[in-house]
Amino acid sequence: MAKPQKRYVCQSCGSVSHRWQGQCADCSEWNTLVEEAGAVVTPFHAKHNLQGGGRTILMSGLDADVALPDRMATGIAELDRALGGGFVEASATLIGGDPGIGKSTLLLQAAAKMAVAGLSVAYVSGEEAADQVRLRARRLGLGSAPVQLASATSTRDILTTMSQGAPPALLIIDSIQTMHSDLIEGAPGTVSQVRASSQELIRFAKERGTAVVLVGHVTKDGSIAGPRVLEHMVDTVLSFEGERSHQYRILRAIKNRFGGTDEIGVFAMETGGLSEVANPSALFLTQRDEGVTGTTVFPALEGTRPVLVEIQALVVRLASGATPRRAVVGWDSGRLAMILAVLEARCGLSFSTCEVYLNVAGGYRVQDPAADLAVAAALVSALSERPVPVDAVAFGEVALSGEVRPVAHGALRLKEAGKLGFERALVPISMASEAGGLRLSGFRTLGQFVDHMLGRG
């Protein structure tokens, strides 16, 4: 009888090696390879007939009638927005975030609202005792909600309990890294345990029609811990973002098989738990009664929601010979270097002897390439000490050639800016027809934009 082969599995990325080594060859993380028992390898022979022994699969056409999935509203509008309308029956949702960011608080609030609405909800905690969860619920004013609560880490015990009688409409597992399956060797949190426990829970969701929510830990770089295959197994992946020193939190949809991605929900952490922020644009804007150099308002787009954020830049001239610094918070540092290079090469501005600091106000992180023009406006304003008009917004993508290119959903961005009282917009020239009630200034190149900022024409 063949013996199981030893294998070493990376706890960061899930790659497999047949010998131990200090650094993972795939993700380059150190000391993440852990020995796990491998499966018996049966060699393949040509005499194996792959065309027989199976069962016939029923095929159907793309034009078959399909009913839209039923959704369960959580009672929290921002959470429903990120989910695409609420939890879907027989689906699996993975939510990740830094420790203490508010994942358990948000799910406990959603569970309580859904239970009060008449749905059966089960909350299983593998990190806290049941009394600890009860105390948190009382602090949040949810102590009387009819949520079924348990503290367990055995996947078999949880599924056996959930299978007795009618299954719950919603099952919350907090967290998947604490779950343990007796079908697999290894400690809880290892790649094999996370994968096996998740597979059993997802199978239960598909067979019994329960919406399962898995809480996941994150690594130091912000990605969800465990094997990457975990994100492929579930139907929806949500990321809870924010700085613990800031009051505001952003719930971002990274993957959604039943809705759009990049939708966000905005919350504020208060003493009574997480509260919804209905108008996030007003949240990320400071008081702008008078012009301040180095600041620009940018209408970002998150899914279908436009969010106005303030981009701040500071340029400090140094004495000759000193090495200038480049510091960025909330934006890509590589993209800042590109904008600075285009401003120097195409527009004749010199930043080589200046320290440059860039910040997105409110702890918000911008990933939209349309922010290029707004960043350029903030940099030119800080360098020339000429403020951008307080009633103007700016957006557009900047190419290495210096061309200002159009971006998607310009009318939606302009409409949001008009709702908040802005009257002017600095945009690519090809978008000058999408007024949205604002006075538009269109630019073909970044050089034309800089001349406009400096009053040259």
Image: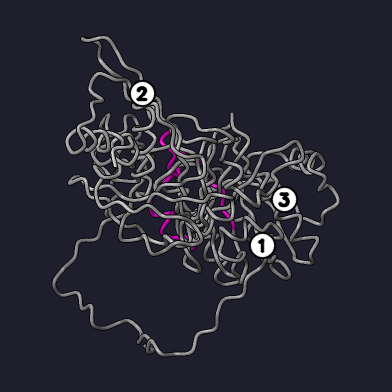
Q: What stretch is highlighted in magenta?
A: 213-235
Residue 109's disc is: 3
Going from the N terminus, do you reach mark 3 or mark 2 first? 3
Label 1 to label 3, Cα distance in Å?
A: 13 Å
Give the labeled residue for mark 2. Answer: 315
**Relative vertical location of residue 170 with respect to residue 123 in this rendering, above or below:** below
Q: How crowded is mark 3: few (under 14 residues within 10 Å), some or many (20 or more)?
A: many
Check whether the beta carbons of the residues at disc 2 and disc 1 lie within 8 A of each other: no
Q: How far apart are marks 3 and 2 (CA)?
A: 44 Å
The mark total stands at 3
In the rendered structure, the answer to whether residue 72 lies left or right of residue 423 reads right
Looking at the picture, tell me which residue is in the foreground, 332 or 196.
332
Of callouts 2 and 1, the N-terminal one: 1
**Pick the front one: 283 or 45:** 283
The residue lying at 59 percent from left, 51 percent from top is 420
The residue where tag 1 is placed is: 170
Q: Which residue lies furthest to the left in this view?
A: 46
Residue 333 is covered by the magenta coloring? no
Q: Which amino acid does label 3 sit on?
A: Gln
Give the CA separation, mark 2 to mark 1.
52 Å
Can you give x and y, in whole percent of width and height, for residue 161 in the image? 69, 60
Q: How crowded is mark 2: few (under 14 residues within 10 Å), some or many (20 or more)?
A: many
Q: Quadrant of the C terminus?
A: top left
Amino acid type, callout 1:
Leu
Which label lies toward us, 1 or 3?
3
- Magenta stretch contains residue 216: yes
Closest to the camera, between mark 2 and mark 1, is 2
